[in-house]
Image: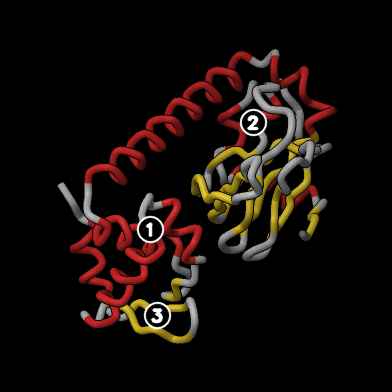
Amino acid sequence: MKQISSPKQIKYAAEHSNFFHYFSTDVDFLSSVQLHRFESNEFILCEGQIPDYLYFVIEGRVKVYITHNNGKISLVNFLHAPCFIGEMELLNAQRDAIGVQAMVTVTCIAIPMHQFRETLLNDPIFLRELCIYLSKKATTNSRTYTHNMSYPLENRLARFIQLTAQNDIYSEKHTEAAEYLAVTYRHLLYVLADFVKGGILEKINCGKYRIVDHEALNRLTNLS
């Protein structure tokens, strides 16, 4: 993780990401916040960690993990800028963080949580915007769940590939993808093999595929 403390860069990032829209005008963050930049596959939060910062993501995409009591790890969500990371811990809805990992280069405005917790929890504009944000997040999660229950795996996998691929390369772990899509490992491999046979994907090596036919993926994901 790279920390950027330059006031000029922080101010530019805040002004060009609509950051100030979420807070009262009398809240002065700029003297205390930093920019944190995470590279692909780097963990922004590790499970069990008590977050030091409330992150406002201004660039990039992340995926969210949770480990169950039996040790099984599940991929549960995807977030993309603009979004918050650590808002549930700020509200004390959960004390310890779940795992959040960068999918691409991710840039965040990092607000020291201990220093600004009371200020944020007493800011009516922030609380209103956070309620709106959490409502939209819940709606998106509900739509994703409904989508996973309503369409064949071919359609859901095409959408998942588009969501997770980087530079036209799909390389998600089969076990995590199968659980996220609520299918068996064997069924997932069968449909991936069909995509390869149909010229949609090209298998590069074990677990990695190149997207060859974007139009075919679009047809599978553009559902009414």
Q: Which residue position holds label 1? A: 184
Q: Residues within 10 Å of mark 1 (few under 14, many from 20)?
A: some
In this rendering, the label closer to the viewer, 1 or 3: 1
Query: Which of the marked residues, 1 or 3, is nearer the chain's N terminus?
Result: 1
In this rendering, the label closer to the viewer, 3 or 2: 3
Give the residue type at disc 1: Thr
The secondary element bearing badge 2 is classed as helix
- The residue under the point 32% across, 60% down is 157
- The residue under the point 51% across, 45% down is 76
Give the residue type at disc 2: Glu
The secondary element bearing badge 1 is classed as loop
How far is disc 1 from disc 3 in space, using C-alphas?
A: 22 Å
Q: Position of residue 210 (x, y in %)?
A: 40, 80
Asked whether 170 or 34 is in front, the reply is 170
How far is disc 2 from disc 1 in space, using C-alphas?
A: 33 Å
Q: Position of residue 31 (x, y in %)?
A: 83, 37
Q: Is residue 219 left or right of residue 144?
A: left
Q: Which residue position holds label 3? A: 210
- The residue under the point 32% across, 64% down is 187
Above/below status of 79 relative to 220: above
Give the residue type at disc 3: Arg
Q: Is residue 56 visible?
A: no
Asked whether 8 or 37 is in front, the reply is 37
- The residue under the point 49% across, 49% down is 78
